[in-house]
Amino acid sequence: MGESCLSRSADLGGTKEPAELLVIIPAFNEQGNILRVVREIQDELPVADILVINDCSEDRTGLMARNVPDVRVIDLPCNLGIGGAMQTGFKYAMREGYRYAVQIDGDGQHLPQEVPKLLQTMQEKRCDMVIGSRFLEVESFRTTWCRRLGIRFFDLLFRTLVNLRITDSTSGFRLYNRKSLEVLSRHYSSDYPEPDAIVLLKKNGLRICETGVTMREREHGCSSITPIKSPYYMAKVVLTILFSCARPRR
């Protein structure tokens, strides 16, 4: 998934040696947010490289990102969804030799200044993937009651199936080390990849941790998960997790 698109459309720019940390920004129709997101990352994480995965946006997302100096952009010729966009980023990170990669969504909800907290948690707890949770420590992110219910349900499901407590399984704010990048660059779900990745990494013997982070509401655009769609979303995620648990280790 994403491999053919990667080889066809990468705009690498420059020849300098890569940093240890790659920031992967999956973006679809985020022209109202992408410039602020990229510039905040450059201000807060000057030693990191930035890769925007433009998931066949119908607006000027890719063009706007490409006009920012020192930002790499991959324009996918077809819409792969969040799973395909992120796997494209994982493949790029593996190919270019990065030690770490962090996902910061293009909607502006993830704060770059929280990335050092993810790195510190990974080092202190020797994790292979760290999830930035909205629901640990002081809650800073207001979400709908149905989403809260779903997240608590998934917490119970993960504890039952893989003996792991996860308070925010749908959070996309995640830090990966080389081991987790290797697994996810080969196998990453196209549908609802965040919960599925937890099961996949756990089954491959990798360690997953959480740390509390601050997030903010998006300023432009809207979430694709509405209250009407939530039951359908939950049912499909549950099936995805169950299938992942039933699959042999990869």
Image (cartoon, rainbow, N blue to C red):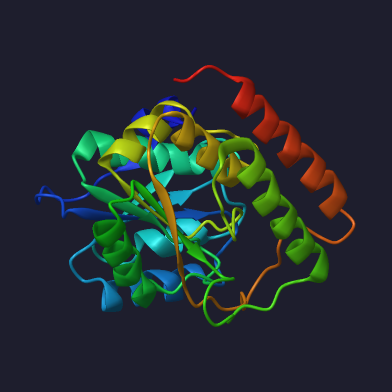
**201 left or right of 80?**
left
Query: Where in the figure is residue 242, as x and y percent of width and height?
Result: 69, 30
Residue found 62% across the figure and 52% down from its top = 58
> Based on the displayed image, in which of its 4 quarters is residue 31 positioned?
bottom right
Query: Where in the figure is residue 226, as x and y percent of width and height?
Result: 82, 60
Give whichever of 199, 221 is nearer the camera.
199
Residue 3 appearing in the image: yes
**9 left or right of 141?**
left
Note whether 187 is above or below 42 in the view shown.
above
Residue 49 appearing in the image: no
Query: Where in the figure is residue 94, as x and y percent of width and height?
Result: 27, 36
Which residue ends up furthest to the top in the rendered image? 248
Note whether 26 is above or below 212 in the view shown.
above
Query: Where in the figure is residue 195, as x and y percent of width and height?
Result: 60, 44
Note whether 246 is above or below 229 in the view shown.
above
Note whether 177 is above or below 202 in the view shown.
below
Give whichever of 86, 202 is nearer the camera.
202
Residue found 71% across the figure and 59% down from its top = 152
**239 left or right of 230?**
left
Classify the position of the C terminus by image quarter: top left
> Based on the displayed image, in which of its 4 quarters is residue 38 positioned?
bottom left
**57 left or right of 15?**
right
How many numbered circles does the render carry? 0
Give whichever of 156, 131 is nearer the camera.
156
